[in-house]
Amino acid sequence: MAEGIGFRVRVYSAILAFVMACGTIGFILTEDLHPIDAFYFVIVTIAIVGFGDISPHTIPSREQLSP
């Protein structure tokens, strides 16, 4: 049973890392952000906090964030 839980944690962690990496790369390419700023923007977006300190300026980025 413990093997199954550890496997799930690794799979979910890998999926989260993949989504964060893709989001960071996407914001670097579409918004021309510094990688640190893009990574921060992805974390804020995933956490659904949305401080408003960084907002998308291009249409592709706005579409990427819209539900």
Image: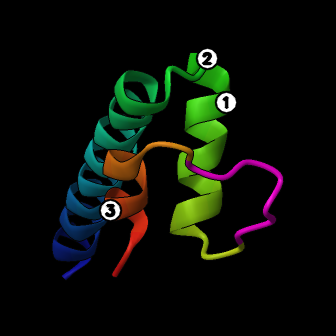
| Residue 8 picture location, percent across and down | 22, 69
Q: Circle 1 is placed at which residue position? A: 37
Q: Main secondary structure of the magenta part?
A: loop
Which residue type does callout 2 highlight?
Answer: His
Residues at circles 2 and 1 in contact by the CB criterion of under 8 Å = yes
Above or below for 51 versus 28: below
| Residue 34 picture location, percent across and down | 61, 17
Which residue type does callout 3 highlight?
Answer: Glu
- In percent of the image, x 28 and y 63: which residue is there? 12
Residue situated in front as seen by the camera: 52 or 43: 52
Give the structural element (helix, strand or loop) at label 2.
loop
Residue situated in front as seen by the camera: 2 or 34: 34
Which residue type does callout 1 highlight?
Answer: Asp
Q: CA distance from mark 2 to mark 1?
A: 5 Å
Lower sequence index among marks 1 and 3 = 1
Q: Is residue 51 left or right of residue 33?
A: right
Task: Residue 34: give its label.
Answer: 2
Lower sequence index among marks 3 and 2 = 2
Residue situated in front as seen by the camera: 50 or 11: 50
Q: How is the image coloured?
A: rainbow
**Which residues lie in the magenta part?**
50-56
Task: Residue 63: give its label.
Answer: 3
Above or below for 16 versus 9: above
- In percent of the image, x 73 and y 48: which residue is there? 54
